[in-house]
Image (cartoon, grey):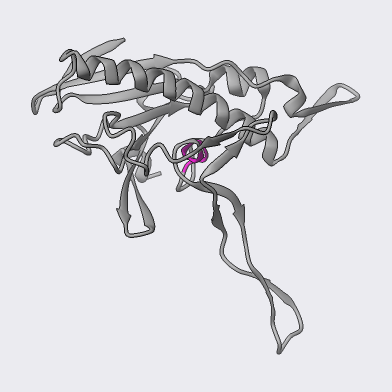
Amino acid sequence: DLAFSIPSGGRLLVEVTTPAPQSKDTWHEEQRGPVTVVSGDGRSKDAALLRLTSAFATKAEIIANAVQKGHAMAEDYKVIAISGLRISQEARIPLHASGNPPEYARAFLPLGELVSRTSLNQETGELEMGPLHHRFSDQIRKPSGSIVPRTAFVSGEFAHVDAVAYSEVGLDDLDRAELQVSVLHNPTSSNPRHPTLLRMAREFVGEIDGDQLHLQPHRLPEIAAR
């Protein structure tokens, strides 16, 4: 959809998509006087993540065809930009771009729900909560029961896609697009220029070490100083 020249050489090629929100039966709304209370659970988040995996797969196929036909070169940095506007505004079950890893990354990496191990302190008799971590999960189950993998950025199947850019589209900093966008770089990218930082608000560069995945966050200097 968009092409930009990169000063160091090659081009930045961007495919843009705005996935539709999940169906309304995946979250619950309750009217309490003048206030509407929206609630959901893990299935609500999975439904939103499925919208991202579907949008990604469609655009990844377009990029693969462009590579096959020679319209996109190996050194071109190929990014799928996903707008979360309809997910956050219409479904009201947002996928956050903050945190390490960002919540939307669970559509592309085998990261399940956040969990913590609780143990009993033998001296005090009190329960103590351990650090939060993501449960390993390489699948998302559709309401129909069918399975969708969340391994796009570890399987190597999408090595032709270098990164995903995601925006929650909030009301803050609307005049500065770079503050609205988070980028997840594909650790299995085959691009010789990987990673090419795009100077967005938050960028995450992954590295796979055996069965371990490490994500290193990079931030614009003015954001890191806040």
Q: Position of residue 100 (x, y in %)?
A: 45, 48
Q: Residue at x 36, y 54 (%)?
A: 214
Q: Residue furthest right?
A: 33
- Is residue 128 among the parts visible in the rendering? yes
Q: Is residue 123 above or below residue 12?
A: below
Q: Position of residue 141 (x, y in %)?
A: 63, 36
The number of numbered discs placed on residues in the rendered structure image is 0
Q: Nearer the viewer, residue 63 or 85?
A: 63
Q: Position of residue 140 (x, y in %)?
A: 58, 38
For the magenta stretch, what is the residue range?
A: 102-106
Q: Position of residue 10 (x, y in %)?
A: 12, 23
Asked where in the image residue 93 lies, by quadrant, the reply is: top right
User: What's the magenta bit mostly, secondary-structure-wise?
Assistant: helix
Q: Nearer the viewer, residue 118 or 43?
A: 43
Asked where in the image residue 190 lies, by quadrant, the reply is: top left
Q: Residue furthest bottom?
A: 123
